[in-house]
Amino acid sequence: MTTRSAFRALIRSTPKCARVPNRSVLSVTGANASQFLNGILSTTVPNHGGFYSAFLHAQGRVLYDVFVYPQQASTSGEPGYLVEYDPRPSNPETPPLPALLKRYVLRSKVKIRDVGTEWEVWGAWGDEKSRMKDAQRKWMFARSGAIEPVWESSGLSPWATTSSTTLHDLRAVGMGWRELVRQGDKALASSEHDVVESDQYMLHRMMRGVPEGVEEIVPMSAFPLESNLDVMGGVDFRKGCYVGQELTVRTYHTGTIRKRILPVQIFDPNSPTPSNLEVTDAPSLPRGSDITAVPIQSSDSERIPRTRGTSKLIQSLNGVGLALMRLEHVEGVENGKFELQIKSDEGDLRWRVRHWWPEGWPEVVQE
Amino acid sequence: MPPFNALRSALRAHGYPSIQHHRTRFLSPPVRILRATYVTKSQSVLLAKPSSEDLEEAGVEPTVAEQATLEITDRAAEHLRNIATEDSDPDVALRIAVESGGCHGYQYKIELTSRRQPDDFQFTHPSLRPSNIVVDAVSLDLIKGSTIDFATELIGSSFRIVDNPQAKGSGCGCGVSWEAKF
């Protein structure tokens, strides 16, 4: 145990970077490019700098979570953007992002090109400089349970850095940096960060409660607030119309968020409940596995509380995962009334599950 | 006694018809019935269409020309004819365009114009003329088969695009934008 924690402390202290798998890039250029993106993205396109955002469906479900990097076309002087997204096909009703964007072009002066083969996406974290940025984050709360980060910045996007291909990754505290790297070039971050495997990035991301891509934010099915897009700064509730705005803003003002994606630890039922979210040798469980809240038998003849519905595991690796948790279950577990379980495919053996409120998230304020 | 029944018997005691009766009288949609029953419409006539070069210039598939149809209601055609008479301009036309925007993705833009663009399709009512409607090739793909109507209402009268076969559901709550089927 001591060696393991010593090892972990060592890992924590060294800044790391890794290639982010399953990402592609579209170029959106032309005189109307900013206006075009502003009409269909869930955040306001800032005058300067890149940002994180999402394309929603008219009925308020998420289609794609994206990072947007502004580019100045050197010759024409027209605005241009690189849009980084997960290109993997998900379900047949979901249009691929290039097709989705082309539907909205109509007569606006916008060109859309697939430049996925020209770029790689990298993430870097654990350095002192990104921690300083994290300290500037303030929070705002809505009655529905929506949580928004607030940044003091005048005009410039808080995500922006001095490089047009590097962004602060502000989706959660400790996420660090996001970088577009020309195919064949070395990531800028690799000079000061140790290069590690992509799996390490995934673990780092999941531990901070950050879902990403079509496996975790399932197109046409995931809701933006349940998928933490509010906490991650991917939704602007004060912006005017954009596709999917009506339902999202109505939920913000009059709804209640009943589910959220949270990091979870998956562990053997015979071992004690872990006191830290940590990497183990537990196998990856199937995505979509049901997580049930089972009442804990108490000695006094207290009425056994009932639970409704199930939470869902949406990703897991080495005992760490992300789950779409019913907040009702989360509360029950925190009050010591339930424990969370996953049935394995082989039969009766069940895995225990423990949720974690991500480090750096604000305490929930219930009105 | 449940409050609803109490209310019902109180009303009956004062000579009012039953609540059931009120409900059917007030919740029926009179406007919709009017439109379905009394508004006559005709298949419009295509007066002019862009050349295949113009369509290529606009970046539109040439097949759009084969499906260039619009329905036009008599009252819409009459209103257009009145505008043409008032302006003494037989070329005046209603320009209908589709723009991206709003919370459901698309919205209509309707304006009067006297100028036809190279990629415009021009329609008219078969008998009530002049009643020009122009639609650019890109927009036509999203409104073909729709009915152009002129609705007169207490709070304002306006041209409307109704029964668009490309539109899905009822659009956004404020009625500004609509969602397309793909």
Image (cartoon, rainbow, N blue to C red):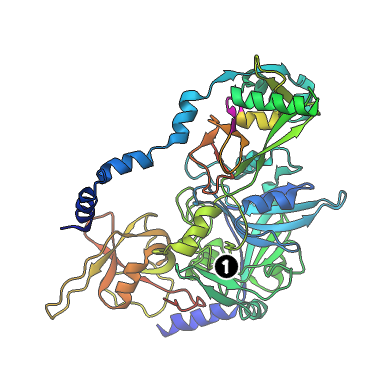
Q: Residue at x 54, y 21 (%)?
A: B40
Residue B145, magenta (yes or no) = yes
Q: Residue at x 54, y 81 (%)?
A: A10
User: Looking at the magenta stretch, what is its main secondary structure?
Assistant: strand
Q: Secondary structure at mark 1?
A: loop
Residue A331 lies, in percent from the top left, at 33, 73
To which residue does mark 1 refer? Answer: A171
The image quadrant where one finds the C terminus of chain A is: bottom left
Q: Residue furthest left?
A: A301
Q: Is residue A132 left or right of residue A22?
A: right
Residue A152, magenta (yes or no) = no
Q: Residue furthest top?
A: B127
The image quadrant where one finds the N terminus of chain A is: bottom left
Residue A341 lies, in percent from the top left, at 28, 65
Residue A320 lies, in percent from the top left, at 42, 67
Judge whether residue A159 can be spotted in this image: yes
- Stretch in magenta: B144-151
Check disc 1: other Cα within 10 Å, few if <14, some if 14-19, many if 20+: many
Image: A98 above or below B49: below
